[in-house]
Amino acid sequence: MEKVVVVVFDFDRTIIDDDSDRWVITEMGLTHLFNHLRSTMPWTSLMDRMMEELHSQGITTDGIAQCLKRASLHPRIVSAIKSAHALGCDLRIISDANLFYIQTILEHHGLLVIDQIRGSLPEIKRTFIYTGDGMGDYCPTLKLGGGDFVMPRKNYPLWNRICSEPKLVVAEVHGWSSGEELETILLNLINQLAM
């Protein structure tokens, strides 16, 4: 039976060191309007309103793409992703971030080696390594089994939740704080699984 290592990444505050929605809002000068409307609308409606405002100012999709290309990715995260791909890992993203934002940033950094998550095939043995930071990453973490790994970003909601009830998480936990740590831990785990 074929064995595949699947590395799953969250996007905001994991692959990029920021929240992509907030990055666009700040870089495009909409912070004041955003803060004014934040308590009055659900997130998706608020982001739709921000896009309407950009459109009314004559900002095009290309202008937003240029803004996204300035978003910060730690160079060691870029090299970790490229190395994991070169080592034959199946790379996936699970994120509630804007798909256009994700694709634009990944393409700009030469990281279109990552696919959206899809169902696994039962005849293939898959070992998962899940990296994330937020509470939205907690439920997927609980689905991981023995032999899988979770890499929560230290001092972020996922890390804090895991630390509050560690016995609920079956996967082996490896926290990280920086791009260097993420790269080192991820590649060590991949190499350990290759043995």
Image: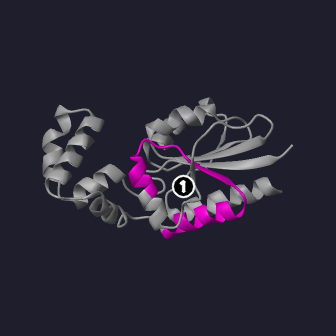
Image position of 124 with respect to 26: above or below: above
Quadrant of image for the N terminus: top right
State the residue in front, 116 or 143.
116
Q: Is residue 16 visible?
A: no
Q: Which residue is mark 1?
A: 176
- Which amino acid type is marked by label 1? Trp
Q: Which residues are magenta?
A: 75-103
- Could you tell me residue 184's position as x and y percent? 62, 63
**189 relative to 43 in the view: left or right:** right
Which residue shows up at 19% across the image and 53% down it? Answer: 54
Which residue shows up at 19% across the image and 52% down it? Answer: 55
**113 relative to 37 in the view: left or right:** right
State the residue in front, 9 or 117.
117
Which residue shows up at 61% across the image and 65% down it? Answer: 82
SS at badge 1: loop
- Most extreme residue toward the right, as rendered? 1
Q: Is residue 102 magenta?
A: yes
